[in-house]
Image: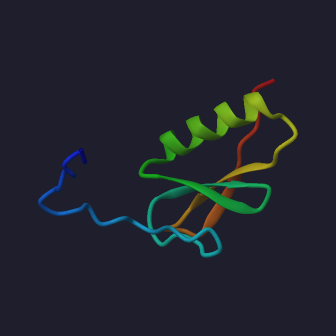
Amino acid sequence: MKKPKLELDEPHPRKIVRADKAPTEGYSLVVDGHFKSHHDTVEAAEEAGMALKHRFQMLQVQVYDAATKTRSMVRLPG
């Protein structure tokens, strides 16, 4: 006996983010020169960068600001 397949009214459109192109809005983490995760606020991006930097100190982690097209390094305190 086959199980009935659940059907949703409308599937949610996927937001496709390309890793080889700089984002046009928000803030992104740049890890060793590659765009990785996207965040809406600079605080969220810095928090994610610090968590990553605490786990892997050897990585070069930066926060990319799409509005000003600038990068700032994430450094461990001390």
Is residue 50 or residue 72 the one in the foreground? 50
Q: Is residue 77 left or right of residue 25?
A: right
Give how far across and how far down residue 30 sits, in percent. 68, 56
> Farthest front residue?
1
What residue is rendered at 54% in x and 45% in y? 45
The mark tally for this picture is: 0
Quarter of the image with the N terminus is top left
> Farthest left residue?
9
Is residue 68 or residue 5 the one in the foreground? 5
Quarter of the image with the C terminus is top right
Q: Quadrant of residue 13?
A: bottom left
Give how far across and how far down residue 18 sits, in percent. 56, 71
Color encoding of the figure: rainbow
What residue is rendered at 16% in x and 63% in y? 10
> Farthest bottom residue?
21
Give how far across and how far down residue 61 sits, in percent. 74, 48
What residue is rendered at 59% in x and 41% in y? 46
Q: Quadrant of residue 25?
A: bottom left
